[in-house]
Structures are given as C-alpha cells and as structure tokens.
Image (spheres, rainbow, N blue to C red):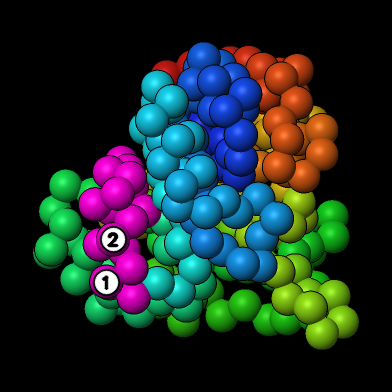
Amino acid sequence: MFATPKIKICGITNLKDIELVSSSGADYAGILVNVSASKRSVDMKKAKNLCSKARIPVVILLWQPTFEEVEIVYNKLKPYAFQLLSQESPELVCEIKSKIPDVVVWKSIHLPSSEQGIAQDVDINIGDMRTRINTYVNSGADVILVDTVYKSGNSVQHGGTGKISDWNTVAKLTENLDASVFLAGGIKPSNVRDAINQVNPYGIDVASGVEKEKGIKDPEKVMELIKITRSFSNG
C-alpha cells in the first residue's frame, strides 16, 4: 500500500489560479519570485497579492538567492517554505534554517530528461548524487524535490520542462532518505499513477501538466490529477 502523496501545484501566476488551487484539495501552492528564466515567475508585488489570497501553504521558489535576498522575501511574504532551484550551497540551507527557523526549506535536485524512462546522454553516479543530496539534508533541507533538467542545443532549462526523468533512478536515489521526497518533472493526469507506483514519493509537484497554456492552470486537469492522486489510500 502507498501513503497518499501530498500535492503541490506550482507556477501560480494569477488570482484565479490561486483560488482554484486553494479550493482544489492540493496541499501546497508554488509561486516563483524573480526567476528571470521562467515565464511563470512573478515580481514581489504580485507574489504578495497571491500569498494574501492563498488558503493553503505557499512555497516560494527562488533561483540562486543570497541569504539577504531570502530574508527580504521572507519578511515581505511570510511563506510556509522556500524552494531553492539552482546550485545553492548547503551552507545557504544551513544559514536559512538557523536564522529563519520557522521556515521549511525545499531543495531541488535535477536529473536529465528521459525518453521512455531511459536517461539520455549522461551516466548518473548514484553514489555521488546521493552523497550530494545527503549534504543538503544534513544541512537542514526538509524536502528534496527531484526535478528534470532539459538541454536543447545551448539552452538548459532546470525545472518547468514538462519532461520526466528516469523514475527508477529517482527511486534509487531517494530510498530511505532522511527527508521528505517530492517528485516533479512532466507529471500529468495520464502518468501520475505510474509516477507514484514507481517512486512512492512523499509528494508530487506539478506545473505544466495541469496547464492549458504556460502560467494558466486548467481546472479540469487540476481536479483530475488530484482525484487520481487521492485514490492512493493510506497504508
């Protein structure tokens, strides 16, 4: 039996969607703040408005911030959690946890996109990657979120790719990890059941898989994904 996974709907950009996600049965809403590479990112003013309307815990996503930037965002938005999206140091995780003890820290780890579950053009050293993940956990990361990095020519996209990674590799990397594990990357209603069966994550994180266009959620897809995910009973 699987425990019913938690659900984070990410990339919220507008008031209609924060209301949709708040009332949908999702557990968390994700808002990107000042992430220049993402079309789903919003500025601080808009993020504050969205946070004020949220009725579920908000995770604020940041790209390579300094601690001072994290502190400013925390003081203005008072989120439930921060998600660090890039190559932030374990030392930053430790500083956040020691100086803002009330906030939860999620750390994104990116694996290559895959085709039919087979990782493309890269060999993943499970031991080295797991050591890196544990460094973040030992520094205080509460959640490890495994997402996808997608390379196309000279372009590299970390997260928000709509691409899956090798879920068997994710399962090996996160087995018996001393932190909650969220699975992201290409999850949608048509494959969420397979994702949960293969990885058995603590939670799933979805953005493009429940959109009708980039940054705009599709209510039917949101509700379908949540219904399927909630069908996994506690056990």
Q: Using residue 189 as the reference point, say whether residue 18 is left or right of it.
A: left
Q: Residue at x 84, y 60 (%)?
A: 115
| Inter-mark Cα distance, 1 to 2 | 6 Å
Q: How far from the left and from the top, in percent, is residue 125? A: 56, 80
Q: Residue 169 in magenta? A: no
Q: Using residue 225 as the reference point, say whether residue 65 is left or right of it.
A: left
Q: Using residue 129 as the reference point, say whether residue 123 is left or right of it.
A: right
Is disc 2 placed on a helix, strand or loop?
A: helix
Q: Is residue 18 above or below residue 141?
A: above
* Neighbour tally class for label 1: few under 14, some 14-19, many 20 plus, Cα within 10 Å: few
Q: Is residue 165 visible?
A: yes
Label 1 close to label 2 by CB (< 8 Å): yes
Which disc, if any, is residue 72?
Answer: 2
**Residue 66 sits in quarter:** bottom left
Residue stretch rendered in magenta on the structure: 66-82
Q: How far from the left and from the top, in percent, is residue 34? A: 52, 61
Q: Residue at x 56, y 63 (%)?
A: 35
Q: Is residue 201 visible?
A: no
Pointer 1 residue:
68
Q: How far from the left and from the top, in percent, is residue 141? A: 29, 60
Instruction: Give the residue type at disc 2.
Output: Ile
Q: Residue at x 59, y 39 (%)?
A: 12
